[in-house]
């Protein structure tokens, strides 16, 4: 703006909206008081006082910490500082010795004396009184040197900070009382052990071995964790594939899927044995049980029960050797530590993983039981009214037996006896031998506890009930050979699946006596299993080493995945099981090897949920769907 713009720059202009105060208001003094109280701190916090039995207000700390840093410097005159100085005394002594041999400069000495005289209690003043002149150890030069002196340097000592931990907790009278009781029990045990050592010195060696064994048991858990860590570091690529890998080529394959090989499980002691049973643990989804035996009736001998974990494939978690070959097993769905096993010699046994013993908790022998032939299938059932564990078994002698575990004893009761025409529980034994039908597989209904299916050696499937032991509810002429597996669907209450040595897998509706679907796999089938996440997906293994995965919602005629999973041509696949949570399957063969595979995204698609309107429409068209 130019000087000649007409404005008077000597005067100050006021804004038009400025607040106008009176003379009294302008002369009024306003006092501001600053205090140390935090306006944001709560003022209404109360806590219960157990001593007085009332709630009391708690004073809040108004201190605001703006900066805090823990230092590593130790006070020189403290005990820890003296200890650190003494630890480096060798270096400092040699340094001070060299410095003491040099001749100090007069000027520097005069300065030091002047400085020391200011402090009458110093060492220099005491030395002057005695007539001894101390040399300057730090500010000195040789008289003959004319070079530039290096600046003086200080040697500092910094130590690592002592270990610290911040702990805060609340305790009530009950916790304090329990802590005192535990401490009192420990003291009593210590006194008892001291008295035993004093009274019986001859058992000193035994006591030492016991303490060593207890020490080993205390370290067992930590060593197992370290072993798993080393294993996961060794097989890190497989662990990453198990967690995160998704096959990107599925986008281009369309409706076909693949199996990604993961870990392989094999134990040295299981050589020469075949995988005869597989079962996942319901609580620990990474743990599964493997039954070892033989399907060759001319080569029967020992067996083994092995528990593997996906966290450690190099060595099993539990190993139980058996005198007879294992033919089947099942883990309790609620009590995950209980496992029932059926043997080739007709015995059944219950193992408890919590027990350290390798022997079963209880065992039913042919002398005390009704079984005289190999037990082909065992299945846990819900506990009875008295909370006793019970399970069912089917054997080659055509009997379905109910077992009840009462005080570490097995009590057996014959539920039904299989025959060609029907149940024959009241017929004499001489007539039963003519019409008996050996049982090969057993499975209970997922929603109705008393209903179960039994597969026979003649290729028939019987629908039975626990409440009706005199006859079958329905009989299906399923296969031309022995039925290896029969299983109910996890979702649909009327659908079940079966497989046989006649090369076929059939899907049934229990209201119809003819199969709904029939799949010819051109080879003898070892096992079939429903997927736990879909009602339309199932997988089957054949003796030629191929795993086939079907999805009826995608293709009702062919498998969407057909993959060879064994390298050797003579190796036969025997069993397959789906993991209840992870998209993983395990496959066993006749060489004692268990392989795990991850399903590609195309093999684990859940079916679309039908709306309520479509369900009502389908029920109107077909009333039998109700």
Image (cartoon, rainbow, N blue to C red):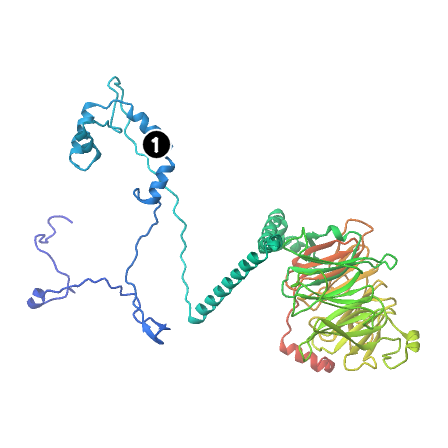
Residue located 93% across and 77% down the image = 430
**Picture quadrant of residue 621:** bottom right
Residue 608 lies, with reference to residue 324, above or below; the image says below
Whether residue 244 can be seen here: no
Viewer-side residue, 4 vs 446 = 446
Quadrant of the frame with the C terminus: bottom right
Residue for badge 1: 92
Classify 416 as above or below 160.
below
Residue 428 picture location, percent across and down: 90, 80
Image coords of residue 572 (percent x, y): 81, 55
Can residue 454 be seen here? The reply is yes
The residue tagged with tag 1: helix, strand or loop? helix
Q: Out of 27 and 318, give the one closest to the viewer.
A: 318
Q: Is residue 602 above or below residue 469?
A: above
**Residue, far top:** 144
Residue 286 in the image, given as x and y percentages of width and height? 64, 59
Question: Would residue 180 be found to the left or right of residue 528 on screen?
Answer: left
Tell me the residue at 45%/71% (across/down). 174
- Rendered location of residue 451, percent (x, y): 75, 77
Residue 9 located left or right of residue 217: left
């Amino acid at each position: 703006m130019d000087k000649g713009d007409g404005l008077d720059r000597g005067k100050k202009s006021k804004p038009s909206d400025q607040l106008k105060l009176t003379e009294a208001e302008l002369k009024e003094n306003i006092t501001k008081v600053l205090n140390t109280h935090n306006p944001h701190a709560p003022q209404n916090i109360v806590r219960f006082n157990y001593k007085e039995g009332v709630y009391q207000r708690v004073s809040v700390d108004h201190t605001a910490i703006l900066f805090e840093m823990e230092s590593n410097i130790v006070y020189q005159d403290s005990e820890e500082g003296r200890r650190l100085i003494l630890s480096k005394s060798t270096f400092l002594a040699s340094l001070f010795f060299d410095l003491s041999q040099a001749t100090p400069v007069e000027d520097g000495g005069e300065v030091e004396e002047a400085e020391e005289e200011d402090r009458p209690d110093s060492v220099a003043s005491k030395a002057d009184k005695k007539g001894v002149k101390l040399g300057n150890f730090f500010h000195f030069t040789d008289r003959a040197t004319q070079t530039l002196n290096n600046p003086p340097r200080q040697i500092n000592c910094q130590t690592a900070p002592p270990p610290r931990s911040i702990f805060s907790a609340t305790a009530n009278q009950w916790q304090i009382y329990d802590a005192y009781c535990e401490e009192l029990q420990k003291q009593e045990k210590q006194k008892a052990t001291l008295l035993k050592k004093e009274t019986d010195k001859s058992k000193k060696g035994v006591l030492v071995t016991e303490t060593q064994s207890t020490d080993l048991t205390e370290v067992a858990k930590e060593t197992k964790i370290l072993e798993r860590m080393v294993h996961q570091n060794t097989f890190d690529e497989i662990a990453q594939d198990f967690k995160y890998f998704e096959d990107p080529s599925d986008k281009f394959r369309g409706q076909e899927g693949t199996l990604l090989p993961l870990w392989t499980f094999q134990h040295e002691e299981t050589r020469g044995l075949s995988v005869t049973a597989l079962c996942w643990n319901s609580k620990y989804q990474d743990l599964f049980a493997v039954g070892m035996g033989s399907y060759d009736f001319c080569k029967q001998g020992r067996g083994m029960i092995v528990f593997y974990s996906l966290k450690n494939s190099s060595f099993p978690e539990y190993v139980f050797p058996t005198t007879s070959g294992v033919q089947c097993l099942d883990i309790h769905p609620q009590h995950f530590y209980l496992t029932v096993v059926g043997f080739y010699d007709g015995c059944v046994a219950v193992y408890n993983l919590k027990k350290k013993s390798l022997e079963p908790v209880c065992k039913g022998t042919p002398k005390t039981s009704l079984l005289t032939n190999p037990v082909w299938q065992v299945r846990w059932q819900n506990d009875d009214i008295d909370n006793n564990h019970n399970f069912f078994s089917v054997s080659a002698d055509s009997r379905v037996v109910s077992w009840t575990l009462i005080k570490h004893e097995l009590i057996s009761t014959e539920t039904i006896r299989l025959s060609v025409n029907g149940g024959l529980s009241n017929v004499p034994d001489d007539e039963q031998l003519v019409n008996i039908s050996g049982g090969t597989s057993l499975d209970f209904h997922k929603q109705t506890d008393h209903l179960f299916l039994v597969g026979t050696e003649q290729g028939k499937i019987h629908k039975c009930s626990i409440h009706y032991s005199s006859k079958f509810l329905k009989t299906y002429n399923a296969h031309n050979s022995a039925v290896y597996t029969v299983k109910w669907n996890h979702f649909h209450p009327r659908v079940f699946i079966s497989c046989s040595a006649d090369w076929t897998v059939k899907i049934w509706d229990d209201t119809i006596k003819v199969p709904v679907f029939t799949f010819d796999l051109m080879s003898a089938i070892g096992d079939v299993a429903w997927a736990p996440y879909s009602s339309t997906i199932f997988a089957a293994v054949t003796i030629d080493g191929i795993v086939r995965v079907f999805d009826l919602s995608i293709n009702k005629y062919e498998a969407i995945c057909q993959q060879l999973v064994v390298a050797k041509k003579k190796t036969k696949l025997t069993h397959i099981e789906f993991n209840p949570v992870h998209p993983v399957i395990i496959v066993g063969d006749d060489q004692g090897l268990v392989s795990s595979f991850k399903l590609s995204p195309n093999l684990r698609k859940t079916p679309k949920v039908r709306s309520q309107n479509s369900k009502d429409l389908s029920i109107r068209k077909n009333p039998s769907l109700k």
